[in-house]
Amino acid sequence: MARQINHPALNKLKSQFPDTRFQVGEFRDMVTVVVPRQNIVETCTFLRDDPKLRYDFLSEINGVDYLNYAGAKDRFGVNYGLVSIAQSTRRLWLKVFLNPQHPTAPGSQWNKIRDEEIMEKSDPGLRVQSVTSVWPGAEWMEREVYDMLGIVFTGHPDLRRILTWNGFDNYPLRKDYPLRGVGERENYKIITRQGA
């Protein structure tokens, strides 16, 4: 018999969003709610503002590439780690799944987009709303997920790369990115002290 998952946020989410289909999972006492991507901002806003839940701290945003993962139905996931400091540091994870509509391998034209063009020219399947309007601290975390996986956060105030350079035409944490890279180390211009 399947074990019942109990978490204070679950019934409140069901009653607040009766037409939204949430999926719930639990692993090592951590509850994850899978949220449809179009509902992420309103779900986060509700979890932050509800007086009995008060998820007032976004501790983490990370991205996962499920390419070749056994049993995976979706290619990418974005995880949001929420903490309610007011409720004795109660935790909840939210997850949004995304599926690209275009090729993701290195060399694809869909990877050759500069930061200033990303909102207009990026893969529509890899776009999700930014939660910076809910938690301003999401800004750098979303930028890192964008830089490493190519997931675009619409409505972000300053979405640009922070670990690689503008114009770098790949996303290093994608599973179809080769471990040795695609020549960036071999072709990287070395700047000496005298030449700087």
Image: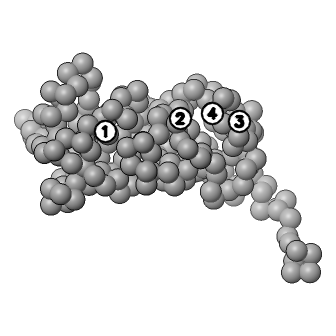
Q: Is residue 51 left or right of residue 121?
A: left
The answer to which quarter of the image holds residue 21 is top left
Q: Amino acid at mark 3?
A: Glu
**Mark 2 vs mark 3, CA separation in Å:** 12 Å
Return the residue at label 1: 45
From the image, state whether disc 1 or disc 4 is nearer to you: 1
**Mark 1 vs mark 4, CA separation in Å:** 23 Å
Q: What crowding class fits label 2: few (fewer than 14 Cα within 10 Å), some (14-19), or many (20 or more)?
A: some
Q: Amino acid at mark 2?
A: Thr
Secondary structure under the numbered disc 2 in the rendered image: strand
Q: Which residue is located at x 62 percent, y 57 percent?
A: 162
Return the residue at label 4: 119
Q: Is residue 158 left or right of residue 28?
A: right
Secondary structure under the numbered disc 1 in the rendered image: helix
**Mark 4 vs mark 3, CA separation in Å:** 6 Å
Q: Earlier in the sequence, mark 1 or mark 3?
A: 1
Colouring scheme, one of rainbow, by chain, secondary structure, one colour: one colour
Q: Earlier in the sequence, mark 2 or mark 3?
A: 3
Do labels 4 and 3 touch, CB within 8 Å? yes
Mark sitting on residue 154: 2
Do labels 4 and 2 touch, CB within 8 Å? yes
Secondary structure under the numbered disc 3 in the rendered image: helix
Q: Is residue 109 left or right of residue 87?
A: right
Q: Earlier in the sequence, mark 2 or mark 1?
A: 1
Q: What crowding class fits label 3: few (fewer than 14 Cα within 10 Å), some (14-19), or many (20 or more)?
A: few
Give the position of the N terminus as an image quadrant: top left
Return the residue at label 3: 117
**Mark 4 vs mark 2, CA separation in Å:** 7 Å
**Above or below, comparing residue 86 to residue 33 in the picture:** below
Q: Earlier in the sequence, mark 4 or mark 2?
A: 4
Residue 157, given in percent of the width and then of the height, sits at 55, 44
Q: Amino acid at mark 1?
A: Thr
